[in-house]
Amino acid sequence: MKHLPKHFRQRWRYIAVGIETDPDTDIRRKDLQRELWYSAGNLLGDPGSADVDLTVYSCRFEDGVGEAVIRTRREETDRARAAIACVSRVSGTAVGIHVRGISGTVRACEERYLGRAAGISEENDVAFANGRHPAYRRDGLVEIQLPSGFVGATELDIEY
Amino acid sequence: MYEAVAAYPNGDTTVSRYAATASRYGFSGIVVRTREAEFDREAIYDRFGVDVVRGIEIDADSPDSASGSIGNFRRSATILAVNGGTNALNRFAVEQDRVDVLTQPMQNNGDFNHVLARAAKEHGVRVEFDFGPAFRQTGGHRVQSLQSLRKLRELVLQYDTPYVVSNRAESHRHLRAPREFFAVGEAIGFSKEMIEQGLSEWERLAGRNRERMAESFIAPGVKCGRYEEDS
C-alpha cells in the first residue's frame, strides 16, 4: 500500500526502560511484550490499551538485568508510563521496572538512555545474617541466595 | 520525596539496597517500616545520597496491644505508624496524638468515614493511601482496592485530612519512581499534586519529628539555646 503523506503519519515516542529481576532468570522479548499488554489491558482497558500501543522494540537481558525500548503514540506517554509501571511480574518472577527516558527516535533513545547494564562481575560466598551464602555481585550491588529466595543487598551489608 | 518500605528481615531487600534503588529513581529518602532492620544511616547517605528514616509500623490485633507498643517504641522511632484494617484499630489510631501515620485503613474489613477523617485531622494523624494493589494486583482484588482508594480520597479531600502515599514495597523490585506514581495516580483518579504531596509528607514528618526529638526541643516554637539574633 502507498504510505501516508508525512503530515498524516502517526508520531511515535520511544520509551527506554531498565528492568531487574533474579540473577538466574532470563526475560525474553515476547514475555515482556505479553506482560505489557496485560498490564495495559488491566489498567486502561481495551480502548486505552489500543491507544498506548506498547510495542517492545528491542530487549536486551543478561544475568537478571536488562533494558528495553518500548514504542507508544506521542500523545499517550503518560498512560504508557502508568501501564509500564504496573508490570510487577514477568513469567512469574517479580521485576523492578523503571522508565529511564523518552525520545522521538529509536536511535536517540538507545544512545541517550541504554547501554548501562553491567554484567555480573563475581560469584562467591558472602557472610550475611549469621551464615555464608552464595551471592552474585554487580557494580556494588549484591544478590544473596538464601534458602527462602534472593535478598537484594549492597556491599555495605556484607562482611568479608 | 520519600517512600516507606519494609526491609529485611521483613522484606526481601536490605535498607542499603533500597537506598541504592531509591537514589536511581529520584527519591531523596526512605522510611524503614521494619523495627528489626539494621542499617548505618551515615554510611548509606555517604554512598547513595539518600536519607534513611527509622520508622516502625505497629501491627496489633487490638487497640490495647497497639497502645502498649506505642508506649514502648515511640521514643526509638522517628516515624511511628499503626497498621489499621479493623474499625476498632482505625478509630484508635486516628485519636492518638502519638501516632504519625495510620497505614492501610481499608484493608480486609476496615472502613473509613467522616468521623475518622475529622479525628485524624484534629490529632495530626496521616492516613496512608496504599498504592500496592494498584501496582501489583490484578482482577477483583485490584478493583476493590481502587474502590477503597477512591472512597478514602473523597473523604480526605472533603475533610482536609493529612495523608501520605506509598506502594508498600517489600522488595526493591516493588519500588517505582515518583513519575511512575504520578502516571498511575492520574490513571486511577488522583491529581499529580496530590501524589506529590503524599510522597513529600513522609519527608516533612521525618523533619518535624527529628526536630522534636532533638535535645534542645522543649515545645513547638520553644527550644534550649542562645537567643536568636534580632534581624
Image (tube, coloured by chain):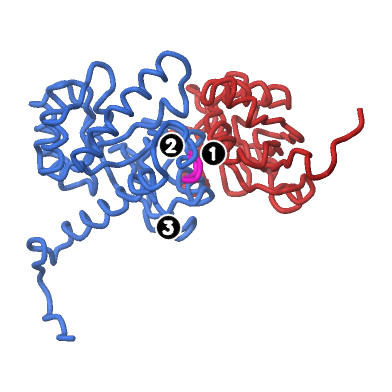
Chain colours: A red, B blue
Marks 1 and 3 on same chain: no
- Kindly check if marks 1 and 2 are in contact, taking CB atoms under 8 A apart as contact: no
Earlier sequence position, callout 2 versus callout 3: 3
Image-based side of A18 in relation to B145, left or right:
right
Kind of residue at disc 1: Val
Q: Secondary structure at mark 1?
A: strand
Residue in view at x 65 percent, y 27 percent: A24
Report which residue position mark 3 lands on: B45
Residue B193, how many percent across, how many down?
38, 48
Image-based side of B68 in relation to A66, left or right:
left
Report which residue position mark 2 lands on: B185
Chain for numbered disc 3: B
Chain for numbered disc 2: B
Kind of residue at disc 3: Tyr
Examine the structure image and report whether residue B178 is included in the region drawn in magenta. yes
Check the image and report above or below for B140 versus B203.
Answer: above
**Marks 1 and 3, how far apart in space?**
23 Å
Which quadrant holds residue B4?
top left
Residue in view at x 62 percent, y 47 percent: A100
Examine the structure image and report whether residue A66 is included in the region drawn in magenta. no
